[in-house]
Amino acid sequence: MDTPQGRPPRKGPLDGITVLDFSRVLAGPYCTMVLADLGARVIKIERIATGDDTRAFGPFVDQESAYFMCFNRGKESIALDIKSPRDRDLLERMLSQADVLVENFRPGVMDRLGYGAERLARTHPHLVYASISGFGHTGPFSDLPGYDMVVQAMGGIMSLTGWPDAAPARVGTSFGDLSAALFAAVGIISSLYKRTRDAQGTRVDIGMLDCQAALMETALARYDVEGKVPTRTGDCHPSLAPFETFAGQDGRFVIAAGNDQLFMLMADALGSPELALDRRFISNDLRCRNRPALVQAIEAITRNAPIAHWIERLNEVGVPCAPINTIDRLFDHPQLQARNMIVQVEGAARRAIRTAGNPIKLSAFADIDGATPLRAPALDEHRESILAELMSGTGDYAPAAELADELASQDVNALWNQPAV
């Protein structure tokens, strides 16, 4: 699609790519947010009257959802009644000019709406069609709903999160949704590259459970090699030591001395070079085996001075370390500020909120992180501009009669209200 009149041109590597975003809540919208941040034009296809579920999620700023604003920045919105012949015609025109479709309904819902992958592969073979669901579109679990908490539990990450003597814990962000979103973005961009060679679209099928398994790091291999089920290790790394938190005079902080050289430098910075000569600690394997004694020896030193003292000394010699920041400290963090990682987003009321920006920094698009607040669209805000743009074209894009008849016999609102993923 051409850029609508009055809309500022996007600058980024995906400039010229149009994405139709049928997704709701988090996994799909986060994926399309990444694409928008990289310059794609993203048009949200929303339900009449209510739109994306997250428009009703708090906290609210001037009656607009900050949750929605965070993940729908830089997008356009159009609300469609799929039963309406006029809106079906409009959607067909949009599909003919779009490059990517993203949806995160449960498997089968898009087929029943008349816009499933198989049908669009025949009628719109250029389209990259990306689906994000709990378990993917194949396999015995494919029909089950899969929220973030479900796949965190089923995928094993909860069994590795928390303290050994405590209950399994959910990761503090929606790890299942966000990891699926990022894998989907990789799949979409890869498919767009493929399309430059053969002009054919691709089906991208992302299962959240698959993504959880892919992010288990070495847990699967460790079990296969050792025959021991990996479990919760609190704040330490199971294969590296010292690689955890330690007590300072005024709280806890992280030291991550991941090899023998760093351990010797750490010992010098702590004013205890003899620590590196202790036979219990002369190799990483021995340090892991003797972790309780190692932690006790280090904390006997670090408890005698504040965190800032140790951070300064460890940084001087190049030992990775960090304070444990609370969220409020991120807004003024000098490194995040220098990298333009705190951006402003505003809704229709134009009251800006601060959130995390785009971490993908590209030398060819240095101005992609602008200082101007990004906009999150009001529901159906862009209907008239999209309509005017599409109606200026030519061609018969009306859907097949059998599709119209099929939709007339279904409760489309019930399909729209299916839970995401």
Image (tube, helix red, strand yellow):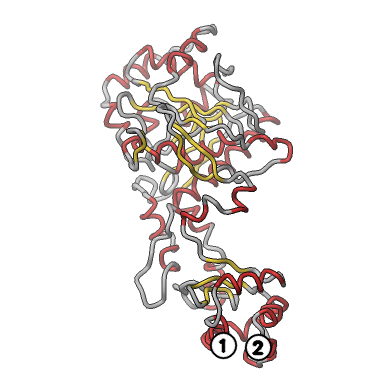
Label 2 amino acid? Leu
Front-most of 414 and 182? Answer: 182
Q: Residue at x 44, y 72 (%)?
A: 232
Q: Callout 1: 10 Å neighbours few (<14), some, many (20+)?
A: few
C-alpha distance separating marks 1 and 2: 8 Å
Front-most of 49 and 191? Answer: 49
State left or right for residue 306 relative to residue 378.
right
- Measuring from the top left, give residue 132's x and y in whole percent: 46, 42
**Residue 366 visible in the snapshot:** yes
Vertical placement of 340 versus 383: above or below?
Answer: below
Q: Callout 2: 10 Å neighbours few (<14), some, many (20+)?
A: many
In the rendered structure, are the residues bearing label 1 and label 2 in contact, judged by CB atoms less than 8 Å apart? yes
Vertical placement of 62 versus 122: above or below?
Answer: below
- Measuring from the top left, give residue 405's x and y in whole percent: 32, 17
Q: Quadrant of residue 306?
A: bottom right
- Measuring from the top left, give residue 130's x and y in whole percent: 51, 36
Q: Quadrant of residue 160?
A: bottom left
Residue wearing tag 1: 297
Vertical placement of 93 versus 340: above or below?
Answer: above
Counting residues from the start of the chain, the first of labels 1 and 2 encountered is 2
State left or right for residue 281 relative to residue 344.
right
**The N terminus appears in which quarter of the rendering?**
top right
Label 1 amino acid? Ala
Front-most of 107 and 246? Answer: 246
Residue wearing tag 2: 275
Q: Residue at x 60, y 46 (%)?
A: 359
SS at mark 2 in the image: helix
SS at mark 1 in the image: helix
- Measuring from the top left, give residue 202's x and y in whole percent: 57, 34
